Amino acid sequence: MRRRYEVVVIGGGHAGVEAAAAAARLGCSTLLVTPDLSRLGQLSCNPAVGGVAKGIVAREVDALGGIMGVATDASRLHFRMLNRSKGPAVWGPRAQCDRGLYPRAVRKALEALPNLDFFQGMASGLRLEKGEGFEVEVRGGVSFEARSLVVATGTFLRGKIHVGAEDGIPAGRAGEPPAVELAEALQAWGLEMGRFKTGTPPRVDGRTVDFGKLAVQPGDPEDFRFSHYARVELPDQRPCWVTWAGEALKKLVAENLHRSALYGGAISGRGPRYCPSIEDKIVRFPDVPRHQVFLEPEGLETEELYVNGLSTSLPADVQQAFLRTLPGLEECRMTKAGYAIEYDYFPPHQLHPTLEVKLIPGLFFAGQINGTTGYEEAAGQGVVAGVNAALRVQGRPPWVLGREQAYIGVLIDDLVTKGVDEPYRLFTSRAEFRLLLRQDNALQRLGPMAEELGLLTRAQTEVLRERVSTLEGVRRWFQGTTFTPPQVNPLLEQAGGQPIQEPARAMELLKRPGVRAEALARIGEAPFPPGQAGDALVAVEVEVKYRGYVERELERVQTLREQAGFSLEPDLPYRDFRTLSFEAREKLARVRPMNLAQAARIPGVSPADLQNLLMEVRRWRRQRLVGAGTSGKQEEG
């Protein structure tokens, strides 16, 4: 059995799902190969999507026609807009999801795509075809041909689970075997590999928790949607709960550190600094008296709770003991032990910004295989890899998202330009253009790009145009609407401002601190429903309140684009450019940036190096032209 596809995607996690969906939407015959089709888009750790920066990425994936947004809405149990007390540039939508509903919503969305096929099995081998493309072998004697190949294997490459200091159990995740043959096949192609680790906390039976001792955390009541294009029915919300890990837990962990896989020497891979295990917290922050712990629902049809904040690789008996030190969990029963998982990854300096492997044309990597952590980071990479795998087959120019266009662009540029020495996690602080890259304007930033690429259905295109029209209508309303003192003074006083004596335009009133666009729209009886124009209202509010900051960011974007206009040839002899520092030569030769803007972001390349690089490249180009001219004359003679 051997079938031919234009694009084959290995892996059905968040990266693989989005890659397969993107390639299929662009019209390529696409195959998704995964060990278990019932776990497409599995929420392997915390069943939550979004958060600070991550929520913006989830909305960007949706704006590009992806799967994550609609699956999140269909399975949402608890929603909160994080950082609401801060500026809108760092607002982060976050949803706790039903662990069972989410993958079912993903599969439903995927099965609606006419160009996408599925095959359940473990990829066991890869071969480069003599012409163009690859042969993908699957256990059981099945193989497939692919012109472009996306590998999105998550933690499966030689994955090993650790609970306690004993030898780990080979697994891609709990209950599933690792992909050993595939790791060996990729390594045989001469690619550099590394080893990372991540972890997950224990789960508990909610029926054994005393909620009277916990602080309740209700969800936000607003009708927020991650998806711009679809309005699925939202499940009923359930609360989360907050407790604290105190001195008793710290003492138990400290006494048993030698039994931890991480501190007992069983794990060699490095873990994510920004999502530390409870062992790391106790060792690195010994003076912190207590650590916050969240109890989060796993689903509508179960009482099981996810214990967020207690990721661990300690033995199960220690986990049960330290859980019972938490207020409200004194009598709890653990339903699943937490564990650490160690896995192979490929350092991402080996990739182009399209996520194509430099050494092997047509091969793309997406997700944790590139050294990242997080569902949203994986999904964003999946879209980019899937789109570029399809564009390559179709003979179309590659697609690269800039840092000024999307958080996905920030993520990928960080990976390929700076590399990783720990599992990469996205933060708002990593983006220079935070005011331009907000969750509320993801559609207006990326929707037209998705339409131009061909990623959107006809129905999605109609929604996009309607949303753009709504935004323009909101702008016009604020520019043309005037409020009288009796209309608006109560609102101004409530916001702590001075009342007006004469009629004033809505746009001028919106500049005042504490005055919200939605509030003005409601008292002014705007012709658009404020509840349905939420993104547009926030966008206009940011444009007005932060106009000076936005204009400065746009000026910096222009500078970045001018630098990006100075392209750098892929075969530049960086090590021969003696006016550059040795470190700059080594880093430039390793990364091989596409343009001057990317070169400027490489650690170790100084402003002086950039100036010298300009001079060296121009000199190299002149010499090459002279050489070409001389060669041509010799041939003519």
Image (cartoon, rainbow, N blue to C red):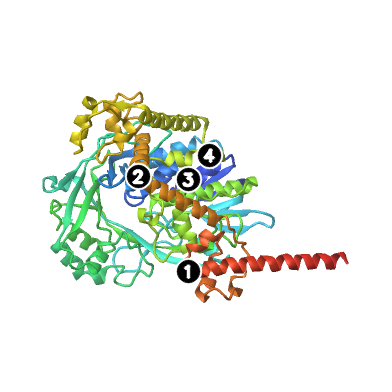
Q: Residue 18 has which mark? A: 3
Q: Position of residue 590 (x, y in %)?
A: 54, 68
What secondary structure is marked by label 1?
Answer: loop
Mark 4 and mark 1: span between their CA atoms?
A: 39 Å
Q: Which residue of the protein is positioned furthest toward the left in this rendering?
A: 212
Q: Earlier in the sequence, mark 4 or mark 1?
A: 4
Give the residue at mark 4. 455
Residue 40 is left or right of residue 100, and the answer is: right
Which mark lies nearer to you, 2 or 1? 2
Residue receiving disc 2: 546
> Which SS class for mark 3?
helix
**Three-letter amino acid code at the position of disc 2:** Tyr
The Cα atoms of the two marked residues, 2 and 3, are separated by 34 Å
Which is more N-terminal, label 4 or label 2?
4
Tell me which amino acid carries mark 3.
Glu
* Residue pointed to by mark 1: 606
Q: Which residue lies furthest to the right in this view?
A: 637
Residue depicted at x 36% and y 56%: 429
Give 264 or 511, whichever is nearer the viewer: 511
Looking at the image, residue 591 lies above or below residue 129: below
- Few, some or many residues within 10 Å of mark 2 (<14, 14–19, 20+): some
Q: Are marks 2 and 4 in contact (CB under 8 Å)?
A: no
Q: SS for tag 2?
A: loop
